[in-house]
């Protein structure tokens, strides 16, 4: 970006600028040097000499020219801008920010300086400060291409700050000014995070059409959008394309792995499941023990590390009985909320509840393991075919005394009738919370089934939604907050119910693992744990899946479940 010349520029400036615009640097220098010999302290000439130094990869000499120009410059803001460009050429970001701050202080309407300041702050991950600068650029510039570039970076800032709707609006504003593959890609990312998959696909495909060599990131996000929209064949084709051109791309292998598991291609899926570590989907925790190879070692001790989310810990724990038959001793790490439940359920192993520290000091007092394995890698040894999934009646065991206490309490406080647990929200902003959550107004057909008493199993900050559900549908949802503090207590409450109805969340895993009948409402294209077309989750024989017939259509799914619930009460 060429700096504007100072007031009353030297006659040689216009010709030099023209040659520089044509990238004829040698001719530009030949034009500029005689003028500099005649006027060695002319600021406008010194600024141009600095830019030529910078473009010839001599930014230190450019800084020297700027220092001289500042002594007499009529517009020192322009010199500070060029000084910042020299610092940027040297990757001295802090020095560049300092110079740009001086420039915009001296001339608050210097749009290019505001833009470069915002762009540089964004590179430093100073998102709020970058937003301030970029918004100032948009306010003062009449230049539509510059405004479009600033809006694109505004979208990046909002996206990094998890303000996805604002990011979407900024990317769209950038496209209104000047269509670009970057802005289309950013818009696709925003729509993907908002679970507006069809719009994400449109944006990504438009970006692809304008690029000769699209990045792997763009292709993989397009594949994810295809998968979320239920186009599994399209997603597979994209993931395979990336792997073919970049065999070591761990993200591509991770996405393909999840698609394989979604479609119950168990052996192929588990073969790539370890890619989650290199892809950043799960933190790798190196321990000073050999990785277990699946072979029986009846004299050895194996450490099983807790892996991924709470529901995953429960799901993978189903492999514990298989594991115990192969090893002499097993140490099973788990989330503290699962400690008592796992200890009771797996008396044959040593359960340790920890906070997943990387150091091995939490193993003090235990047998020294010869082997280690993350729990998510266990299915690759034990769940490679449909018939490998056991038909169990519950592999987790709730405290029988607490189950009795909850049963008696519910009988006293609720009375006779079907007692049904309810959970309506699953996931986070980064794990498709919008696709996995059913809004309060949609629950009407289920909540209005007669002769059913509902019990809250939703955790987290649920009170506003619980109140809204009760007020909208004129029903009471019995709430026992003390049952959500510890999963052992939650398990006892679930055991005292007749049925659990839930979206895709850890409650589904807990209910299925203790053998309770659980009906799971899944998006049209759910996460791999819920499969692409099965009527139940292979991990939990007591589960039953109610799927969206189309993306976003919870109404029909809820009506279908309500009919099944009414039949159950009859």
Image (spheres, helix red, strand yellow):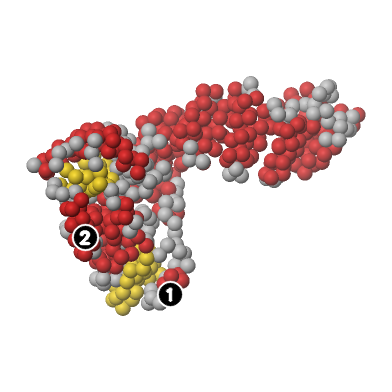
Q: Residue at x 40, y 53 (%)?
A: 276
Gap in angstroms between the C-alphas marked 2 and 1: 36 Å
Question: How far across and down, in percent of the image, does residue 366 sit?
Answer: 38, 76
Residue occupied by mark 1: 364
Could you say where residue 193 lies in the image, as x and y percent from the top left?
Answer: 42, 38
Residue at disc 1, secondary structure: loop
Name the residue rendered at 81%, 23% in the picture.
7
Does dot 2 land on a helix, a strand or a loop?
Answer: helix
Identify the image quadrant of the N terminus. top right
Residue 76, label in figure: none
Instruction: Examine the rendered structure and indicate whether residue 47 appears above or below residue 501.
Output: above
Quadrant showing the C terminus? top left
Residue pushed farthest right?
38
Q: Is residue 392 above or below residue 33?
A: below
Which of the two residues, 341 or 533, is positioned nearer the viewer here? 341
**Can you identify the residue that label 2 sits on?**
405
Of residues 43 and 24, the one nearer the viewer is 43
Query: Which label's residue is closer to the chain start, 2 or 1?
Result: 1
């Amino acid at each position: 970006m060429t700096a504007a010349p100072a007031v009353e520029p030297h006659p040689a400036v216009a010709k030099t600028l023209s040659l520089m615009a044509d990238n004829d640097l040698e001719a530009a220098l030949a034009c500029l040097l005689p003028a500099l010999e005649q006027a060695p302290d002319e600021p406008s000439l010194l600024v141009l000499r600095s830019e030529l130094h910078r473009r010839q990869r001599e930014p230190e000499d450019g800084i020297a020219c700027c220092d001289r120009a500042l002594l007499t410059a009529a517009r020192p803001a322009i010199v500070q801008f060029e000084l910042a460009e020299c610092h940027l050429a040297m990757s001295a970001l802090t020095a560049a920010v300092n110079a740009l701050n001086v420039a915009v202080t001296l001339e608050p309407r210097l749009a290019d300086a505001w833009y470069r300041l915002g762009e540089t702050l964004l590179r430093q991950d100073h998102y709020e400060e970058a937003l301030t600068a970029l918004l100032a650029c948009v306010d003062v510039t009449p230049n539509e291409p510059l405004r479009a570039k600033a809006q694109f970076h505004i979208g990046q800032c909002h996206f990094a700050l998890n303000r996805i709707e604002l990011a979407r609006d900024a990317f769209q504003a950038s496209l209104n000014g000047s269509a670009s593959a970057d802005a289309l890609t950013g818009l696709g990312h925003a729509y993907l995070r908002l679970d507006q998959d069809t719009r994400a696909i449109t944006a990504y495909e438009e970006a692809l059409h304008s690029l000769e060599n699209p990045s792997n990131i763009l292709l993989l996000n397009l594949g994810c959008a295809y998968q979320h929209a239920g186009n599994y064949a399209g997603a597979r084709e994209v993931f395979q394309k990336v792997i073919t051109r970049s065999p070591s791309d761990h993200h591509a292998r991770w996405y393909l792995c999840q698609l394989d598991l979604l479609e119950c291609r168990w052996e192929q899926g588990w073969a790539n499941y370890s890619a989650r570590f290199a892809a950043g989907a799960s933190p790798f925790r190196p321990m000073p023990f050999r990785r277990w190879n699946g072979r029986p070692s009846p004299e050895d001790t194996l450490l099983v590390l807790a892996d991924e989310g709470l529901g995953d810990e429960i799901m993978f724990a189903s492999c514990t009985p298989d594991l115990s038959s192969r090893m002499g001793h097993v140490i099973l790490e788990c989330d503290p909320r699962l400690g008592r439940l796992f200890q009771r359920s797996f008396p044959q192993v040593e359960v340790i509840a920890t906070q997943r520290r990387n150091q091995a000091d939490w193993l003090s007092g235990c047998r020294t393991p010869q082997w280690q394995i993350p729990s998510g890698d266990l299915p690759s040894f034990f769940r490679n075919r449909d018939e490998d999934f056991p038909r169990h009646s519950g592999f987790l065991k709730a405290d029988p005394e607490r189950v009795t206490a909850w049963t008696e309490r519910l009988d006293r406080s609720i009375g006779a009738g079907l007692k049904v647990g309810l959970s309506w929200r699953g996931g986070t902003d980064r794990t498709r919370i919008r696709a996995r959550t059913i809004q309060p107004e949609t629950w009407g057909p289920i909540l209005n089934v007669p002769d059913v008493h509902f019990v809250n199993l939703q955790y987290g900050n649920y009170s506003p939604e619980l109140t809204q559900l009760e007020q909208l549908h004129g029903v009471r949802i019995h709430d026992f907050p003390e049952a959500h503090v510890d999963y052992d207590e939650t398990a006892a409450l679930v055991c005292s119910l007749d049925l659990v109805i839930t979206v895709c969340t850890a409650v589904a895993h807990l209910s299925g693992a203790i053998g309770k009948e659980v009906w799971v409402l899944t998006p049209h294209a759910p996460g791999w744990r819920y499969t692409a077309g099965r009527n139940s989750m292979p991990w939990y024989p007591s589960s039953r899946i109610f799927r969206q017939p189309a993306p976003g259509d919870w109404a029909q799914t809820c009506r279908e479940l309500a009919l099944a619930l009414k039949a159950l009460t009859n």
